[in-house]
Amino acid sequence: MTQAYILTLSCPDRRGLVHAVSGFLLEQGANIEEASQFNDSATGLFFMRVQFACDSADIAALKEATATMAATYGMKWGLHSIAERMKTVLMVSRQGHCLNDLLFRWKSGQLPVDIKAIISNHRDFYQLAASYNIPFHHIPVTAATKAQAEAKQFEIIEAEGAELVILARYMQVLSNDLCQKLAGRAINIHHSFLPSFKGAKPYYQAHDRGVKLIGATAHYVTADLDEGPIIEQDVARADHTDTVDDLTTRGQDTESQVLARAVKWHSERRVILNGHKTVVFR
């Protein structure tokens, strides 16, 4: 029975890499269905994503063969079956627009993820979680209990085998320790006003300054607050007739769309880290 896989890799650039990868896949009896590559002249690195199909259902053997090939070229690589949806945990506070959007897209089959749990420091969305039959974990967070709360959060993430953690407007700053534990597998969404408009009411500040553009940024979580590698961004026009409510609504719509695209690309293995940047094979 034919199986579909995605191979992602990065390594120092050199001649013959595309030939080496395509030749290796041919040896495995694979048929390449989609391939993208990028040579970064600034870093001297080569990036590639290949989607292929082959008769082998033994992914362990396929990974072993891939490891041998990759070692020759010093490749960092990943090999995943398309049939296995990415196990995901959502984290949210009291703003539910991104959470609601992701749940709808997931239920509609638009996102190749398997949402295993929702974690929140408030109870606001337990009924929404129940309506989708997703376990809801209420873990309050205070300055005094932050370490214990994060330990519980990470325990849930690990117990669910989550490859992806989405901060869908989770309004607590993660500790450096948790950021390191989730490196490369946690995505956050924030308004693009940062760092110009910091704080809890960015759209009020934006309205006060008469901005002409509002937007959103989806990025990987790092210990440097809101400075992780950017996956996706978008903007919406604004003008002098817009109220704070207008800006908030338009901004939240933009946040939801940007986060959904970032999650889709990540779960399809289209995003590869390139230092403090990303390569996104859309």
Image (cartoon, rainbow, N blue to C red):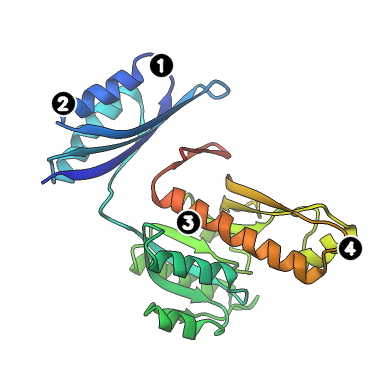
- Tell me the mark number nearer the camera, choosing from 4 and 3: 4
The answer to whether the residue labelled 1 contacts the one labelled 2, judged by CB atoms less than 8 Å apart, is: no
- Nearest the viewer among 124 and 228 is 124
Q: Earlier in the sequence, mark 3 or mark 2?
A: 2
Examine the rendered structure and indicate whether residue 212 appears above or below residue 8: below
- Residue 257: numbered disc: none
Q: Which residue is mark 3?
A: 182
Q: Is residue 132 left or right of residue 143?
A: left
Q: Which residue is mark 2?
A: 27
Q: Secondary structure at mark 3?
A: loop
The answer to whether the residue labelled 4 contacts the one labelled 3, judged by CB atoms less than 8 Å apart, is: no
Q: Secondary structure at mark 4?
A: helix
- Tell me the mark number nearer the camera, choosing from 4 and 2: 4
Examine the rendered structure and indicate whether residue 172 appears above or below residue 38: below
Q: Residue at x 34, y 68 (%)?
A: 160
The answer to whether the residue labelled 4 contacts the one labelled 2, judged by CB atoms less than 8 Å apart, is: no
C-alpha span from label 1 to label 4 = 52 Å
Q: Secondary structure at mark 2?
A: helix
- Residue 14: numbered disc: 1
Q: Earlier in the sequence, mark 3 or mark 1?
A: 1
Q: Is residue 98 left or right of residue 46?
A: right
Q: Report the amino acid beneath label 3.
A: Leu
Q: In which image quadrant can residue 13 be found?
A: top left
Q: Earlier in the sequence, mark 4 or mark 3?
A: 3
